[in-house]
Image (cartoon, rainbow, N blue to C red):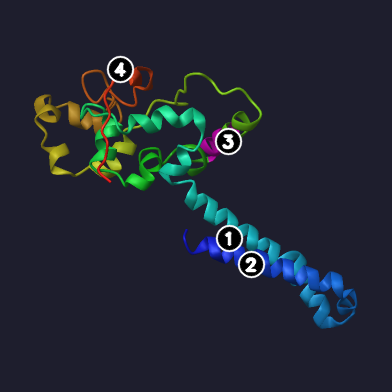
Amino acid sequence: MALRTPLLISLIALSLMLIALLVARPQMTSTRGGKMLAFLVLFALPLLCMAVGVSSEMQRSKSTQFCLSCHVMEGYGRSLYIDDPAHLPAAHFQNHRVPADQACYTCHTNYAMFGGFRAKLHGLRHVYVQYLGTIPQQIHLYEPYNNRECLHCHLGARSFEEGVVHNADPDLLPAVKANKVSCLSSGCHDTVHDVSRLKDLTFWKPKE
């Protein structure tokens, strides 16, 4: 992403310079070379700028900073710093079990623009609600959290496969892997973001 931004700025600057040249010297378009330049300036370069821009923004939108840039997500960002290992997102974020700079995306890879067609439609709805609609007081997932998002990291890990609780019932682990029993079931990892209780909790302050 760091390389895409300067490239995009350079392409936009080049486009503006060439447009200014065509405006200042419109007679250039009467020649074959001038027509090719006009095509480059008016069609090819804008399309290239758009492609680079979309790619750059798609990468940026995976960042934790981007996800938490909306006011409605502020509480979810604070929940990553709850000083309690029982809070699942906080434990993963603080111990770098997920990349800190892509924490939201890592655990919600099927969400909004990164998921399938339906998820992308939901992402467009988010944009509409953010700018034109009414943001709900409480946010809910569109569908129950899929164990797949946990298993793409934990599946095969010794702590997961050989965990005492996971193996206390021989039917439990196969059911979790098949998404028949949620990892977030009551009595398991059921304390997630817990934004409604933030005022009652203590927070971890990372050393600078």
Q: Amino acid under label 1?
A: Val
Name which residue lies at 89% across and 74% down: 26
Label 4 crowd bin: few (<14), some (14–19), many (20+), radius 10 Å = few
User: Which of label 1 and label 4 is nearer to you?
Assistant: 4
Please name the residue that numbered disc 2 is placed on.
Answer: 11
Contact between marks 2 and 1 (CB within 8 A): the answer is yes
Q: Which residue is mark 4?
A: 200
From the viewer's perspective, tell me whether residue 111 is left or right of residue 19. Answer: left
Point out the frontmost of discs 3 and 1.
Answer: 1
Secondary structure under the numbered disc 2 in the rendered image: helix
Q: Is residue 156 left or right of residue 205?
A: left
Q: Nearer the viewer, mark 2 or mark 1?
A: 2
**Which circle's residue, 4 or 3, is located before the other in the chain?**
3
Residue pointed to by mark 1: 52
- Tag 1 or tag 3, which sits nearer the N-term? 1
Q: Residues within 10 Å of mark 1 (few under 14, many from 20)?
A: some
Does the magenta-highlighted stretch encompass residue 46? no
Residue 118 belongs to magenta span: yes
Numbered range of the magenta stretch: 117-125
